Amino acid sequence: MVVFDKPHALADVPMHYCPGCTHGIIHRLVAEVLDELGIEGRTIGIAPVGCSVMAYDYFNCDMIEAAHGRAPAVATGVKRADPDKHIVFTYQGDGDLASIGMAETVHAAARNENITVIFVNNAIYGMTGGQMAPTSLPGQVTQTSPYGRDVKHCGFPIRVCEMLSELEGPEYLERVTVNSVKNIRAAKKAIKKAFQNQIEGKGFSLVEVVSSCPTNWGMTPQAALQWIEEKMLPYYPLGVYKDRTAEEAQV
Amino acid sequence: MADKVLMKGNEAIAEAAICAGCRHYFGYPITPQTEIAAYMAKKMPKIGGTFLQAESEVAAINMVYGVSATGHRVMTSSSSPGVSLKAEGLSYMAGADLPALIVNVQRGGPGLGGIQPSQSDYFQATRGGGHGDYRMIVLAPASVQEMASLTVKGFDLADQYRMTTMILADGTMGQMMEPVALDFAENKAPAKDWATTGTDMKRPHNVVNSLYLDPAALERVNFERYERYAYIEEHETMYEEYMMDDAEICVAAFGIAARVSKNAVNEARKQGIKVGLLRPITLWPFPKAPFRAAADRVHSFISVELSMGQMIEDIRLATECKKPVTLCNRAGGIIPSPEQVLEAIQQAAKNGGAK
């Protein structure tokens, strides 16, 4: 009896991610959700520019590679082309979503575009070798903040869920993490809800996944997961930042 | 003969796009092409299409990228500064071999420039606009009728060759009103087996992508693309010749400059000057053959442009500088007058081809 198998929506190919990177976990959670909701055949995924650029090879659903930061705009086009059939998700990192693509992110949320956004926040540019990200913590040492992020010089990191929660538009915003089994389970629940919302036509659903980058943080995978707990989560608290349907049900 | 309606050039583009089966339009307001967006905003919701005002030109072209990836006909329109912003998306669409129609109703530049008509985006359009080795098919209408018919043609070419087609118009073409016949046959996009419309669990996944980390693979797709471009150069070049049979001087002009130049050619003919007009309709592919042929017959060329002289370089390349080419131009949003062009013709007649 098979008790644990690769999800169908996850391609059976070697991934290029570094040892200890949590992209693999997050990919798997997305793929499990596509399987469980039975939507792989009508899903189109949008890959970003960044570490997960080759996500187009890792999912078995149709995939599109977008320009840096433009995934929400590309997703808008795909969704509007056939809103009844297409289930559309973007998979984006912090540089992609919160820096170069912030305008596309904010406006897709403001329009309540009926798409699902998986936002992987690891507080660093991984693909290019560890530069400061819009979400790098104050004091965080990176290749382009070698003396630590000086907020007087380059400002403060952006809390995306909190910022978007001020908009009327979005349906659902939740921040999760994948640094423990318990948290991974909670992350999957959030990702599933974000797709379920789209199926039900509720609108823009974003799940921010606080993630690790052992390679560019210069830590062991285990220490990186600990760093999430001790450094990232105090600045990026987990939780639901917006759930319109739940809020309306309460009124 | 089909019924004609009086329409603005910009509106003719919008209506022709709908005739061509385009049901998705994304844009951002900018003078002097906003009538296209306004027309689409009114029409699209009534025919089950999409009109969406994007947050930026960058977003608009990426929405176009998304629709195109699903195989549907799609367009955007803008004017010069906005097209610069779209350049990133145009490069990605070229790299992913995606078809779409892009309209540039040019205004004076560089920078914010002005809002009056110009042709100073010729280089940008004919050389692709963004980074990397690629081309766009560039169509230059010279009447409201051509604004419509070249729009329909543009969608067909884009789909046939899996590339972007640009309508390179100018503020005059966009704003002027002329009678136009819109009796195009109902036209739909051909089947596209590469499109990302969902696998329906019946086929391996399709991927729309421009990333090739293997240099040999990237080189291969570039060479394949240029084979396609060579075929287009051979088969899709369009131009109009006017009084070129016995011409000793060739006036070259496109768009509104060609309209003005035709008047000047007529006037010069009355004065006994043997002059003709060669009007490129495709700016890329540039009609090299008729220019090459003309170079054997005429003693000089005059390039009439609403720019500091951009097409003139393609004329010199096509004719291998066999005969002198002079520039008759205005810039900054000013249209050359027929008198100015006539004077240039008279001067060329006097010089008789002397360099």
Image: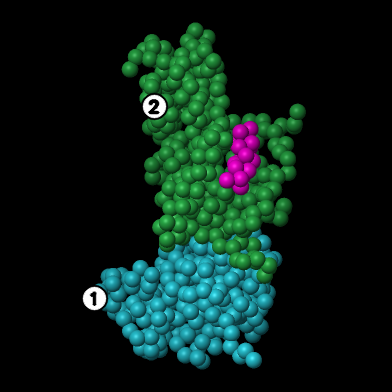
Chain colours: A cyan, B green
Determine the residue positioned at 62% across, 63% down. A79
Rendered view: B299 above or below B317? above
Name the spot of residue B122 as percent of width and height, x first: 45, 37
Q: Say which quarter of the image contains residue A78.
A: bottom right
Magenta segment boundaries in residue numbering: B145-161
Residue, far top: B272
Q: Say which quarter of the image contains residue A61.
A: bottom right
Alpha carbon of mark 2 to alpha carbon of mark 1: how far?
Answer: 58 Å
Q: Say which quarter of the image contains residue B36.
A: top right
Foreground of the two, A25 or A228: A25
Q: Can residue B140 be seen in this view?
A: no
Determine the residue positioned at 57% across, 36% down. B236
Which label number is shown at residue A147?
A: 1
- Crowdedness near tag 2: few (<14), some (14–19) or many (≥20) residues, C-alpha within 10 Å: few
Check disc 1 and give the amino acid type.
Tyr
Which label number is shown at residue B320?
A: 2
Rendered view: B199 above or below B41? below
Is residue B297 found inside the magenta-colored segment of the image?
no
Rendered view: B86 above or below A89? above
Determine the residue positioned at 72% across, 53% down. B46
Rendered view: A209 above or below B280? below
Q: Is residue A121 visible?
A: yes
